[in-house]
Image: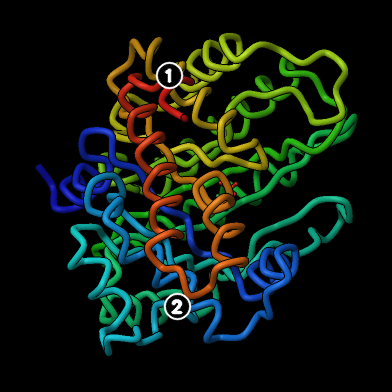
């Protein structure tokens, strides 16, 4: 087994998932503003350190995606953040794209940037302890979108990124996110997601990326948030499985879903059903940001000094999602 494949299997080992704590400072500021906490480097560290030192980390969280600011921060106990994460039995990772910018020639779409100087940045992150990385391509659905141009150019960037990351002995998370925003149906989400993922793997193969050392981070197949015809959770799970079975090469060991603006319970419930019906060899787990942190952030914002209380809220969510990653979650366990 390759070294990269071992890292994937460690991160997604038996129900473990990923904590996506890689919000950029701008995004984290928005999150903190919604709970009326000032966005300072100290507060951002305090919240994140609280989660990273929770017992749920050891039990449930196989990997943590960090942001550039956080990977360089020192904890209150004078440890480096990647060391804290490793001590908790989890694997430190880093977001390496520099954000999605307007795509020239298609002003309503985005292209993710960050390839310039990436090889050097990767070496630095590796020295800081990162063992895996993340790059997010983002697509919106409307009558004209996603365009062929956005599908092609984001897949190309994801493949160039992945090849560079593996060259530096780290595992790339390949995240093509089809946004939930809009009136589109679940069928449209299915078709576009399938086309996007297929193009990503076509490019990854062209760039000689070792698929056994990759984690795919896709969206679930959902109707748009403004669509009148919502589908049931059962249908979400079945369509998501069908889409991935059809578009992901079998060599890929693990798939870790983003939550994408679903509520915490909805994301957990859908993940649980996906695992109940999973008749593939893919590990199907989570790489949630909001759906792992929302309740904990809300609690913490009102009780900043109550570390244990915040950790309890986080531990519960992590546990629920780890049960869902084994298909063993039920609503009653939420109480
Ligand atoms: P959400 O789970 O909040 O969608 O965040 C996951 C993520 O990492 C988006 O890039």
Q: Is residue 178 above or below residue 127?
A: above
Q: Is residue 50 above or below residue 184?
A: below
Q: Nearer the viewer, residue 309 or 4?
A: 309
The N terminus sits in image quarter = top left
Q: Is residue 257 above or below residue 279?
A: below
User: Which class describes the residues within 10 Å of circle 1: few (<14), some (14-19), or many (20+)?
Assistant: few
Q: How is the image coloured?
A: rainbow
Instruction: Say which residue appears at 22% left-offset and 53% top-offset.
Output: 58
User: Which class describes the residues within 10 Å of circle 2: few (<14), some (14-19), or many (20+)?
Assistant: many
Instruction: Say which residue appears at 30% left-offset and 69% top-offset.
Output: 130
Q: What residue is shown with label 2?
A: 70
For this view, does 229 lie left or right of residue 172?
right
Mark 1 vs 2, N-terminal side: 2
SS state under label 2: helix
Q: Which mark is residue 309?
A: none
At which x and y percent is residue 249? 38, 27
For this view, does 193 lie left or right of residue 132?
right
What's the CA distance linking mark 1 and mark 2?
34 Å
Q: Quadrant of residue 104?
A: bottom right
Q: Is residue 302 above or below residue 105?
A: below
Instruction: Say which residue appears at 67% left-offset and 74% top-offset.
Output: 37
At which x and y percent is residue 192? 69, 27
Q: Which mark is residue 330?
A: 1
At which x and y percent is residue 295? 56, 50
For this view, does 152 lie left or right of residue 295?
right
Instruction: Say which residue appears at 55% left-offset and 33% top-offset.
Output: 197
Query: For the residue with label 2, is its CB less than 8 Å from the closest atom of ligand 1?
Result: no
Q: Quadrant of residue 286?
A: top left
Q: Nearer the viewer, mark 1 or mark 2?
A: 1
């Amino acid at each position: 087994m390759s070294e990269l494949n071992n890292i994937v299997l460690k991160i997604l080992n038996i129900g473990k998932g990923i904590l996506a704590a890689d919000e950029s400072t701008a995004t984290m500021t928005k999150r903190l503003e919604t709970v009326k906490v000032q966005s300072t480097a100290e507060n951002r560290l305090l919240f994140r350190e609280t989660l990273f030192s929770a017992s749920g980390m050891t039990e449930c969280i196989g990997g943590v995606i960090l942001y550039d600011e956080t990977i360089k921060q020192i904890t209150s106990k004078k440890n480096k953040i990647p060391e804290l994460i490793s001590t908790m039995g989890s694997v430190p990772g880093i977001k390496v794209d520099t954000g999605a910018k307007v795509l020239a020639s298609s002003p309503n779409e985005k292209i993710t940037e960050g390839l310039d100087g990436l090889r050097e940045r990767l070496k630095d992150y590796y020295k800081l302890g990162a063992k895996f990385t993340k790059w997010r391509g983002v697509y919106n659905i409307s009558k004209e979108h996603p365009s062929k141009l956005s599908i092609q150019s984001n897949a190309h960037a994801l493949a160039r990124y992945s090849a560079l990351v593996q060259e530096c002995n780290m595992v790339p998370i390949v995240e093509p996110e089809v946004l939930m925003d809009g009136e589109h149906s679940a069928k449209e989400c299915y078709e576009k997601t399938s086309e996007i993922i297929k193009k990503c793997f076509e490019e990854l193969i062209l760039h000689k990326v070792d698929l056994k050392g990759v984690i795919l981070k896709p969206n679930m197949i959902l109707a748009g948030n403004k669509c009148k015809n919502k589908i049931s959770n059962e249908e979400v799970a079945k369509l998501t499985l069908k889409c991935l079975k059809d578009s992901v090469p079998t060599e890929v060991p693990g798939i870790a879903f983003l939550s994408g603006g679903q509520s915490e319970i909805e994301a957990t419930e859908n993940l649980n059903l996906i695992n109940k019906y999973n008749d593939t060899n893919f590990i199907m787990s989570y790489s949630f940001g909001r759906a792992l942190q929302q309740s904990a952030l809300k609690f913490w914002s009102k009780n900043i000094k109550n570390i244990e209380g915040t950790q309890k809220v986080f531990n519960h969510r992590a546990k629920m999602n780890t049960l869902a990653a084994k298909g063993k979650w039920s609503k009653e366990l939420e109480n």
